[in-house]
Image (cartoon, helix red, strand yellow):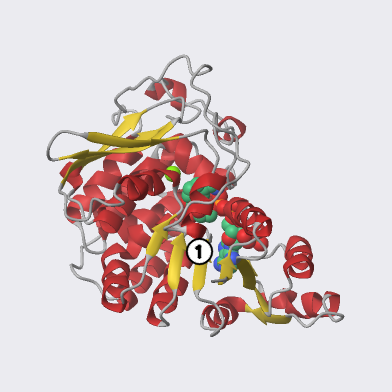
Amino acid sequence: MKKHLVLLGSTGSIGQQTLSVADKFPERFTIAGLAAGSNIDLLEKQARLFKPAMIAIAKKELVPELEKRLRDTNVRVLGGEKGLLEMVGISRADWIVNALVGFSGLRPTALALEEGKNIALANKETLVAGGELIMTLAKNKGLDIVPIDSEHSAIFQCLQGEKDNKIYKIYLTASGGPFRGYSLEDLSRVKLEQALKHPNWVMGKKITIDSATLMNKGLEVLEAKALFGLGLEQIEVVIHPQSIIHSMVEFIDSAVLAQLGEPDMGVPIQYALTYPKRWQNDFKRLDWRKIKTLSFEQPDTRVFRCLKLAYEAGEAGGTMPAVMNAANEIAVELFLNEQISFLDIPCIIEKAMHKHKVILEPSLEDIKRIDMEIREQASFFKNDLF
Ligand code: NDP
Ligand code: MG
């Protein structure tokens, strides 16, 4: 049976890779909708190639220009968050691929589930900020959330056929990013361009910085907690610089299952689209003759404080992970604009968390309000640093 996909964030790193996977199987997938933030050149190109019924552009003022460019097609152009949400609700789509970046992914995920659509989820911030709500919604509706994030895909794959077996622990692997082995003093001198160079993966800017601070792994700890219903003490992060083992599950009998492969996001993206099946592809295959070493280290959370802050946010629960996420988004943006230094990132997050009074069992409205409140204080956090 053909799957009808709506792809949110189609112009991004995951979005473009999703389209190239879907393009290889035209008899299995149709693209019912595409959404992007502001990149109308690429969105126009994608719309011409994949012929979706609708596209949505977050920057509303770009709608007339996009409509003008696509006048010779039947593609309907929607604008703003409202447009994106309308597209998520369109009846023809049965799967939503959420490759948006940041908190903007939460509302569309919640709406998609309410509308009875399964989700292939790359947008980890959704599960950090609103994990419990989203997982409950999916469960109540009997819908699938299939992770695209490579570590979570690895664990999801290891858990197939293990429904009634208890997990002892999971091990999320991390490459360690560009600053592995750095001291705090080394980190105090790093520049934006160094942070933007990831050793093993080419990704969007935000996740690249998150990987350099290890906040990416912190977000992934909270993503895994929600997705697999685990306690924080069951989630361990291990630095594995080769990025060959994508993550591991240890069961109560001490057996450990791992998923391995070349570091290529095409694999978890394709698995999310074809789940529960596997299809033949031409991705690079693992050649054990060329693998010299698989090594492991413990992360240094004294130097990479973001990872520790994520565990603390998870311990506090309720709205705290949403606060941590919003403060991180603000801090990363400031760092990308070269307004703060690399080590200011954890300081801003810690300050925001310190000030916050947790609301336990928040509603979606509570989470949205708190996310907004933290963003409104961005300039305060920045000025308070000096
Ligand atoms: P990118 O920055 O490359 O892409 C983000 C996409 O979202 C772009 O299409 C962008 O549009 C769009 N977008 C941004 N804001 C909005 C908005 N408000 N409304 C609509 N569209 C918007 O990010 P990545 O692809 O790297 O990452 C996407 C998600 O996947 C993140 O949550 C990340 O953590 C996760 N992830 C990414 C991996 C990777 O390898 N890249 C690996 C694992 C997880 P525009 O181009 O127009 O700005
Ligand atoms: Mg990951």
- 340 above or below 367? above
Q: Which residue is drawn at 52% across and 79% down?
A: 85
Residue 385 showing in the rendered view: no
Q: Where is residue 235 in the image (x, y as percent from the top left)?
A: 23, 42
- 176 above or below 339? above
Q: Position of residue 225 (x, y in %)?
A: 26, 53
Q: Which residue is drawn at 82% across and 80% down?
A: 73
Report ligand 2 position as a quadrant: top left
Viewer-side residue, 299 vs 339: 299
Residue 204 showing in the rendered view: yes
Horizontal side of 362 relative to 245 (left or right) equals left
Q: What element carries label 1?
A: strand
Horizontal side of 323 relative to 167 (left or right) equals right
Q: What residue type is labelled 1?
A: Asn
Q: Which residue lies furthest to the left in this view?
A: 253
Viewer-side residue, 267 vs 316: 267
Q: Where is residue 263 in the image (x, y as percent from the top left)?
A: 52, 35
Q: Mark 1 points at which residue?
A: 98
Q: Position of residue 129 (x, y in %)?
A: 34, 62
